[in-house]
Amino acid sequence: MEPNSSFIYSYAKQLTEIIENALNEDIGDGDHSTLACIDQSAVGSAKLLVKENGIIAGVELAEMIIKKLDPEAKFICYKFDGDTVAKGDLVFHIEARVHALLSGERLLLNCMQRMSGIATQTNNLVRIVSDYGVKLLDTRKTTPGIRLLEKWAVKIGGGHNHRFALYDMIMLKDNHIDHCGGITKAIHATQYYLRSKNKSLKIEIEVRNVDELNEVLICGGVDRIMLDNFTPNEIENVIKLIPKEFETEASGGITIENIQEYAKTGIQYISVGALTHSVKSLDLSLKAT
């Protein structure tokens, strides 16, 4: 299988850097276990097996990892990113130099297990809110250095990416507002900054209560309002006050148990940090054949 996702084409350089850094971290001056007992010319095969039910993610990344170590490696795929998998399923079969298989095994599994865990958790929540027209968002609560992989996994699971980092969207949170001296000051300062830098970035602002919401509505000048730690009842009470020109987002304290209640409120976006910051990896195994 040749990598064909738009995500790979969009982030090819960053993905290559992540793979190179991870391989350098793991291999160092050599995979001495493999070097000690396996002939460098030996060719072998391996298969990726699923050990629990979920959504598979990282298949295309796995191919990139192995082909970084052996450009002549061959992949035969039976499952693809985003597919539902069950215990015992065969995801892919690899033919490559044995050195590449053994040296890349742990990186491949670490990435795929975590990505599949994130995709599975995301998909579980997406299915719960699918009838309500709301978009499920991730956050920046990601593992440093591999945010790209984790946000890719969210997309594979059917979710949507919020801003990728600090540079691609303005988000005025409680600490920004408090340090600046209030909501109106923060919005005006942000608008001036964007004009002076000739930047066109969307502005989102976090509000913690109805008073702050009213101040934002009077001031205007933002694209999205985040209702932080509002209960579903509180959102239902205020959502009708917010003009259609503003996007709306719910965040804070949202779990698999209560997300449907939030989705029913008419909110447009729900962001959930737990998609990436507290996820159980999906159990996978790479076995020689």
Image (tube, rainbow, N blue to C red):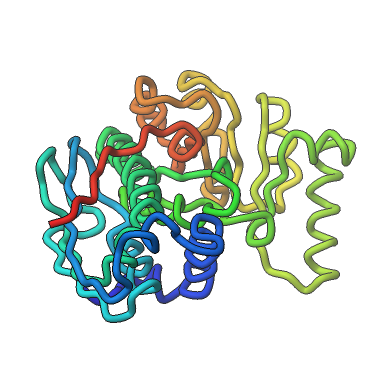
Q: Nearer the viewer, residue 279 or 213?
A: 279
Which quadrant would residue 101 be assigned to in this image? bottom left
Q: Is residue 263 visible?
A: yes
Taking 286 as reference, is 68 above or below it? Answer: below
Q: Residue at x 28, y 60 (%)?
A: 59
Question: Where residue 2 sits: x, y (%)?
Answer: 25, 77
Q: Nearer the viewer, residue 229 or 164?
A: 164
Taking 61 as reference, is 257 above or below it? Answer: above
Quarter in which the N terminus is drawn: bottom left
Question: Where residue 104 sits: x, y (%)?
Answer: 37, 60
Q: Residue at x 32, y 35 (%)?
A: 125
Question: Where residue 18 sits: x, y (%)?
Answer: 52, 63
Number of disc labels: 0
Q: Is residue 7 left or right of residue 171?
A: left
Q: Nearer the viewer, residue 173 or 124?
A: 124
Q: Residue at x 85, y 53 (%)?
A: 189
Q: Residue at x 78, y 49 (%)?
A: 187
Question: Where residue 172 sits: x, y (%)?
Answer: 72, 44
Q: Nearer the viewer, residue 86 or 37?
A: 37
Q: Is residue 103 visible?
A: no
Which quadrant would residue 42 be assigned to in this image? bottom left
Taking 191 as reference, is 109 above or below it? Answer: above
Q: Is residue 148 left or right of residue 7?
A: right
Q: Residue furthest front?
A: 36
Quarter in which the C terminus is drawn: bottom left
